[in-house]
Amino acid sequence: MHPASSQDVAQLVKAAYGSNFGFTVSARGHGHSINGQAQTANGVVVQMSGSKGVSGMASGRKPPHPRVWPQERFVDVWGGELWIDVLRSTLQHGLAPKSWTDYLYLSVGGTLSNAGISGQAFNHGPQISNVHELDVVTGKGELLTCSEEQNSEMFHAVLGGLGQFGIITRARISLEPAPQRVRWIRVLYSHFSIFTSDQEYLISLHEQPASQKFDYVEGFVIVDEGLINNWRSSFFSPHNPVKISSLDPNGGVLYCLEIAKNYHESTASTVDQEVESLLKKLNFIPASVFTTDLPYVDFLDRVHKAELKLRSKGLWEVPHPWLNLFVPKSKIADFDKGVFKGILGNKTSGPILIYPVNKNK
């Protein structure tokens, strides 16, 4: 079914709940859920994203477009809206959501049912920490508006609730003035403990003024040279490949700290200085600083380039499972020893990302 409104979804779920035979209903955003959760047997899949109004109750109608409230700094969006389209709508008003995922071709309802984590989470919290209000269709087909103040139990159950408590049909998302450009930096480490202590130091600055912290802190593990030279690479060009052996004579695992500073054309003159003073406090391998400067949208949409490359080679529409884990700070060194250096060793693998997050966010 291709719904055009919350009422369409509520009507369907109500019919399923009240039916003598009963039938299953599954909500599908962009189809990235695991275990076939976006499918259902002998039931109805509610196609929340890309609804063209081609079948079901919505014939000819389409879901509402994002509605931006510039003064209040929030946007109301349909649950099936893709984050890339939310970004395009808010940028028309010079605004943007605060917290992101690395990949933007995911639905709002989908990431809010999980958490929504990227390199901004240390500062703003995950996407679920940046929502003012939701419209949710419950398992009985009731349509509830919920927030911290109203139906708060439902609000907190649905955010990060893995789609188990209802279908998100509208979300009201917090916005901030959109930066224009991003200084994107990668530095390398051969010692995990130094890498993590630098990550931890950078996220401890979250309460400092914008000029005294980075806006994005992530990192990844490099277990083979193919990864450093190919993956998401606007940095390490094939003409100038980085050799792990040249940085770590033992040919071991390397760690890449990925940091970014947002700025406006008007403050461009101070960016170099701000970045320099932050980098001075870090302990990366000297001469391993790789920097690029790009428009804000290109930075946020960086993974899409890699997707297009993989699609052209027929490597996108294949299973590429991800495992996401929260690891406490006290156990991260054991994880490095047992997994990065142990299980993986120097084997070729897909990307291994490390997002440092403040627990209080």
Image (spheres, helix red, strand yellow):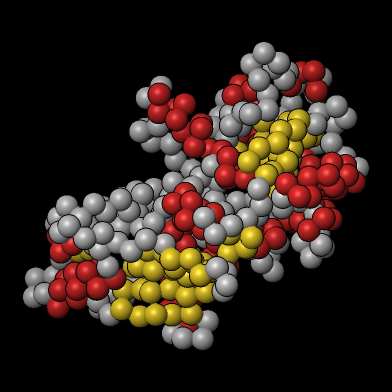
Q: Locate residue 230, reporting x and y percent.
A: 59, 24
Q: Taking the image as drawn, is residue 68 in sight?
A: yes
339 or 317, which is in the foreground? 317
State the image quarter where residue 124 is shown: bottom right
In the image, what residue occupies the spot 30% across and 50% down? 50
Of the 4 image quadrants, the one containing the C terminus is bottom right
State the residue at coordinates (38%, 74%). Answer: 135
Number of numbered discs on residues: 0
Residue in the picture at 14% in, 55% down: 55
- Which residue is more in the foreground, 200 or 111? 111
Q: Residue at x 39, y 48 (%)?
A: 32
Q: Quadrant of residue 72?
A: bottom right
Going by the image, does 300 lie left or right of 199?
Answer: left
Q: Quadrant of residue 80?
A: bottom left
Vertical position of residue 191 compared to residue 146: above or below: above
* Horizontal arrangement in the rendering, residue 359 relative to residue 128 (left or right): right
344 vs 254, nearest the viewer: 254
